[in-house]
Amino acid sequence: MNKKRDHIETRVVHAGVKPEPITGAVMTPIFASSTFAQKEPGKHSGYEYGRSQNPTRDALETSLADLENGTNGFVFSSGLAAQSAILELLRPGDHIIAFDDLYGGTFRLLEEIKKKSSAIEISYVDFNKVDLNKVIKKNTKLIWIETPTNPLLKITDLKKISNIAKKHKVLTVCDNTFASPINQNPLDLGIDIVNHSTTKYINGHSDIIGGALVIKNNKKLSDKLAFIQNSIGAVPSPFDCFLVLRAIKTLALRMKQHNSNGIKIAKFLANHKKISKVLYPGLNTHPQFKIAKKQMSGFGSVITFYHKGNLKQIKKFMQKLKIFVIAESLGGVESLIESPALMTHAYVNTKKNQLTPIPINLIRISVGIEESNDLIADLKQALI
């Protein structure tokens, strides 16, 4: 019989966090130590060196594993460091099938680093338009997914992809950053590895850089990732781990407001005369709306839309905003706005022969937790 689990609203507060045994501190302390005393040479209490283990980091990894319904979590100094660890599972000549719409930094990591340093072969496809059975080759070792994608917010059927991958014995990874563990749990749909930039929704306060991986019931994979994490050493500081642990306690509350604000502002933009098209998984006009409803419990606060104006007019609109801040990133309590073509995805437009270029009139916003009517009023006055 499966043990009944607490609701996610309870787990974000308590998962991974226990009173510290010596002092009784309710919140996990910041263990700012690079090394730990050993009882005798080679005999320690579970902690020997800060790169390998740290109690504050352990608490965060346990919390994230719980929130994603996984068994093992691994945290890193950035989302890209976490993705680099996944790629270290591969060998020269291995083949990756990746979504044709990805975070610009992921494209850069794959194209400029792994292709050149490790001779990794990569095929970029739209998972909604191809038969994966026909794309998988003998040397295919990994299927790389974002859903929703960045910046076009494409949704793809995770259960369908995981079933195909298992048939071919191919590993799957899903970057779940745009959904958060509150809105989507890819491990429950058969995905092997969940990836997060903890910088975004999970921390949600725009004050740390971090990344995470979570897996479920796979000791061999867990051992490999633990070895890679320790060997590469791209781990977060105890203080950063503490900040993320603290932020997680309000994750469910924040996501409730993000989700609520997101759909309201998406509907407002969809009806504005200066906007030609809005992409948001929670709108029934989204091409994969039915898939989103099936595998997501909320649709987040990232909205992508096409402005009808030219670059000069678009810049003027963005600069007139009073609440929205022109900045990269997303998932924070404050509302942000950016031009993917000029900011987060500028790299993509330098590779127009290999990657689909990002239009200059594409705008991405990350709706914060402010009052939605204030945000709508801000957009309205800037769109005049």
Image (cartoon, rainbow, N blue to C red):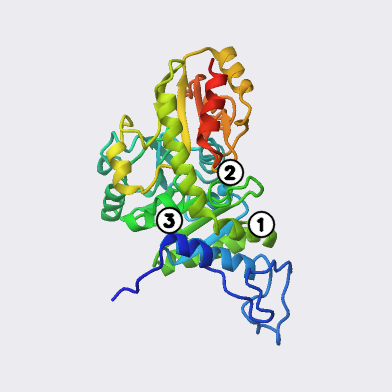
User: For residue 315, what is the image quadrant?
Assistant: top right
Pointer 3 with pointer 1, Cβ within 8 A: no
Provide residue 295's location: percent of width, then percent of height.
32, 48
Q: Residue 193 carries which label?
A: 3
Amino acid type at image mark 3: Ile
Q: Residue furthest bottom?
A: 40
> Which residue carries the number 1 mark?
240
Tell me what residue is drawn at x 53 percent, y 18 percent.
383
Tell me what residue is drawn at x 57 percent, y 13 percent.
313
Q: Can residue 86 be seen in this view?
A: no
Badge 1: how crowded within 10 Å, few (<14), some, or many (20+)? Answer: many
Provide residue 363's location: percent of width, then percent of height.
51, 25
Question: Of helix, strand and loop, which one carries label 1?
Answer: helix
Q: Which mark is residue 303?
A: none
Q: Quadrant of the C terminus?
A: top right
Camera-near label (2 vs 3) is 2
Amino acid type at image mark 1: Asp
Reading the chain from its start, which is encountered first: label 3 or label 1? 3
Camera-near label (3 vs 1) is 1
Pointer 1 with pointer 2, Cβ within 8 A: no
Report whether 150 appears left or right of 381.
Answer: left
Camera-near label (1 vs 2) is 2
Pointer 2 with pointer 3, Cβ within 8 A: no
Q: Gap in Å between the C-alphas at discs 1 and 2?
A: 18 Å
> Which residue carries the number 2 mark?
333
Reading the chain from its start, which is encountered first: label 1 or label 2? 1
Q: Quadrant of the N terminus?
A: bottom left
Question: Of helix, strand and loop, which one carries label 3?
Answer: strand
